[in-house]
Amino acid sequence: MNLQQLNKKINAYERLMRLDKPIGILLLLWPTLWALLIAAQGKPDWIIVLIFITGTVLMRSAGCVMNDLADHSFDGLVERTKHRPLITKEVSKKEAYWLAAGLCLAAFGLVCLMNRLTIYISFAALFFAATYPLTKRFLAIPQAYLGIAFGMGIPMAFAATTGNVPTVVWPLMAANIFWAIAYDTEYAMVDRDDDLKIGIMSSAITFGRFDVLAVMLCYAATLLLLVIAGQQLALGYGFYGGLGVAAVVAIYHYRLIKAREKSQCFKAFLHNNWFGFAVFVGLVAHYFTHYFM
């Protein structure tokens, strides 16, 4: 294999892992960072933070490879996915299986640096990541399952930092599930016609003409559950200011998706990075004022 062929193969692997599209990493990372900050009461161990960030990148990459393997028979029929490396034969299925296995092993190697409880929870995280692609065949709202898979960093963060999983994890997890339904419904609104044609389930199909209303109700539920978590944790005004900014972001998304134009729905999906960032900044603001003012 010459240098040009090697570069093409590396590029294909990067696209298979979606490293060229970091939004998935960010949507997976924000709730994990929320949990790390809360679990450490604003003073996280930076070694643990680095391990979780690296693990998030590895597992999101593995999840994308597993998703493409599971959807191999469908992706060629969808306009947005017909150029993915498995469909174009730039990467073989055997290579993809080895790549997914290697990424999972690398992530597990990092988890092994944590305590036993974190390791146990990581097995559940792997199960949800590996089985999510299959849920599109039978679940009316597979986005809810995605929310669980994307939220497993929350109990893992608490377990790694404190050695236990406190009750505040559950409203945080529930908030992440509703947030995932909101942003992935926006994403699914782009593919709705193709999904109907090939028989894949999605929340955009299930919600039908109430899709925009459902997205906004899910944003509202996300914010309400974060308020409940904030009350349990006795968080201050800085946190609620962050939630206020997140609410403004959600309202902006309504303006984007209300006409159901595909490009605008996709723009709203990508913009969810700022929703997660706003919540994170609110937490930083709370702990900054708590310790320094």
Image (spheres, grey):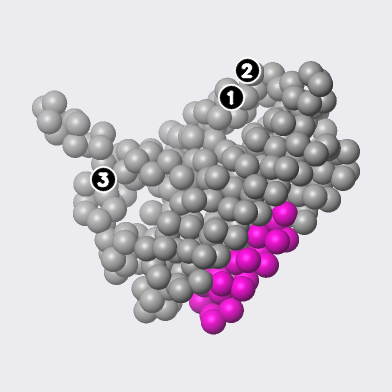
**Residue 212 inside the magenta-drawn segment:** yes
Residue type beneath disc 2: Ile
- What number is the disc on residue 68? none
Q: Is residue 141 above or below residue 167?
A: below
Horizontal side of residue 48 vs 225, given as left or right: left
Residue bearing the label numbered 2: 47
Asked whether residue 154 is in view, the answer is: no
Residue bearing the label numbered 1: 51
Mark 1: few/some/many CA within 10 Å (<14, 14-19, 20+): some
- Residue farthest along the bottom direction in this orientation: 209
State the separation of the CA atoms marked 1 and 2.
6 Å
Disc 2 is placed on an element classified as helix
Image location (x, y in percent) of residue 80: 31, 61
Residue bearing the label numbered 3: 91
Q: In which quarter of the image is residue 166?
A: top right
Camera-nearest residue between 181 and 140: 181
